[in-house]
Image (cartoon, helix red, strand yellow):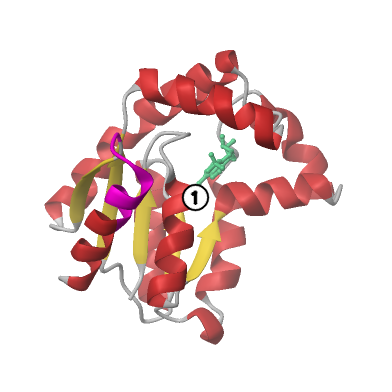
Amino acid sequence: MNIVIFGPPGAGKGTQSGFIVKKFKLFQLSTGEILRNEIKNKTNLGNEIASIISSGNLVSDEIVAKLIEKYISDQKFKNRIIFDGYPRNLSQAKNLDNLLNKYDQKIDIVLNLSVSLETIKKRISERQILENRSDDNAEIAVKRYETYKTNINPVMDFYKRSNLLRVVNGEVSISEINNEISALIEAI
Ligand code: AMP
């Protein structure tokens, strides 16, 4: 099965994806993580995108599409991917459908982790102390939240139409969220 998980920055996508990966033996494809690794390793791509990421904007659709095709086309991951942080806009959602189609796969469920801006600010200020991400200060957090909000509604409508979208309350405890997500996946 392939899963898409999305939610605003700080919603707990990464944490929840980690649980799902273990429980359902999937592979976590986090575009944010892949992009951050490019920056850490100082690749050409990394140098090109560093300032975009630290300003809270989105990297171009073309760049991210190329990165994810590498994984979708790999037999090792066939029908075992959880997409964490992709798609971020309608054109990426359509691209994901096309790519999966090309490699004879599909999305089985889309999880929308729903969290308020207040909670996000609080979580990000806590995370800053632990992880020191360049895009994790309060001001950039708000910018990233706005970027998310601007782009995500058409993505939600897209998945609502195909009846794949499930909304998960991201305000409760990590284990409660985890239980809700597990039940949704088990019901597929
Ligand atoms: P994340 O860890 O998912 O919050 O992603 C961190 C940053 O990486 C985002 O703020 C974007 O700048 C970039 N990024 C991650 N995923 C995407 C995507 N699907 N499309 C464009 N940019 C992305």
Q: Residue furthest top?
A: 139
Residue 36 locus on image (x, y percent)? 70, 46
Q: Is residue 175 magenta?
A: yes
Out of 81 and 68, give the one closest to the viewer.
Answer: 81
Residue at x-position 39% and y-position 46%: 91
Q: Main secondary structure of the magenta part?
A: helix
Residue placed under numbered mark 1 in the picture: 14
Query: Is the residue indicated by label 1 positioned so its CB lies within 8 Å of ligand 1?
Result: yes
**Between 137 and 48, the one nearer to me in the picture:** 137
Specify whether 16 is left or right of 49.
Answer: left
Give the class, few, some or many, for how many residues have Cα within 10 Å of label 1's Cα (few <14, many ≥20). Answer: some
> Which quadrant does the C terminus fall into?
bottom left
Residue occupying the point 28% across, 52% down: 111
Q: Which of 18 and 44 lies nearest the eye of the viewer?
A: 18
Indicate which quadrant contains ligand 1. Answer: top right
Residue type at mark 1: give it: Gly
Q: Position of residue 157 (x, y in %)?
A: 19, 42
The residue located at (33%, 41%) in the rendering is: 173
88 vs 42, left or right, is left
Q: Position of residue 149 (x, y in %)?
A: 35, 27
87 relative position to 173: left or right: right
Which residue is rendered at x = 36% and y = 82% of the image?
104
Q: Relative to 138, is 93 above or below?
A: below
Please state the horizontal and vertical placement of residue 71, each as a whole percent of the image: 56, 71
Q: Secondary structure at mark 1?
A: helix
Query: Is 67 a magenta residue?
Result: no
Residue 8 vs residue 51: left or right?
A: left
Q: Is residue 135 visible?
A: no
Q: Considering only vertical position in the picture, is 50 above or below 110?
A: above
Image quadrant containing the N terminus: bottom left
Instruction: Look at the image and give the residue range highlighted in magenta.
Output: 171-178
